[in-house]
Amino acid sequence: MNKENRPIPAFIRKKCMACKICVDDCPVSCIGVEASGTAKDPHGYPFLEDEAQCIHCGQCAENCPVAAIQMAAA
């Protein structure tokens, strides 16, 4: 598959609960998650730390318990 056509993680922040399963499951450690830090906003803020390091495996999306990550076209 052409590198430009590989899907990358797309984050749905309103669904994220900052469990960090995606961080633990990423084989190349390119995902980060920060908790909101407020009681009014229980969501997390996932992000791709290094897009160049991502191997497009989809483990993050596959293992997210709340479907806050989906693989999308780059």
Image (tube, rainbow, N blue to C red):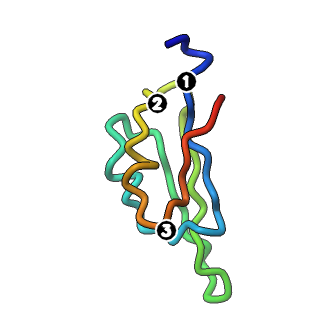
Give the distance between the C-alpha atoms of the residues marked 1 and 3, in whole angstroms.
Answer: 26 Å
Q: In which quarter of the image is residue 74?
A: top right
Foreground disc of the pair 2, 3: 2
Q: Where is residue 58 in the image (x, y as percent from the top left)?
A: 43, 39
Query: In terms of sequence position, does the residue under pointer 2 or pointer 3 come before the other?
Result: 3
- The image shows residue 35, relative to residue 27, as above or below, that is below
Q: Where is mark 2, residue-wise?
A: 56
Q: Which dot marks residue 18?
A: 3
- The image shows residue 73, relative to residue 70, as above or below, that is above
Q: Nearer the viewer, residue 73 or 16?
A: 73
Foreground disc of the pair 1, 3: 1
Q: Where is mark 1, residue-wise?
A: 6
Secondary-structure class at tag 3: loop
Circle 2: is it few (<14), some (14-19), or many (20+) Cα within 10 Å? some
Circles 2 and 1: CB atoms closer than 8 Å = yes
Query: In terms of sequence position, does the residue under pointer 1 or pointer 3 come before the other?
Result: 1
Query: Which residue lies most toward the top here?
Result: 2
Secondary-structure class at tag 2: loop
Give the distance between the C-alpha atoms of the residues marked 2 and 1, in whole angstroms.
Answer: 7 Å
**In the displayed structure, does residue 70 sit left or right of residue 26?**
right
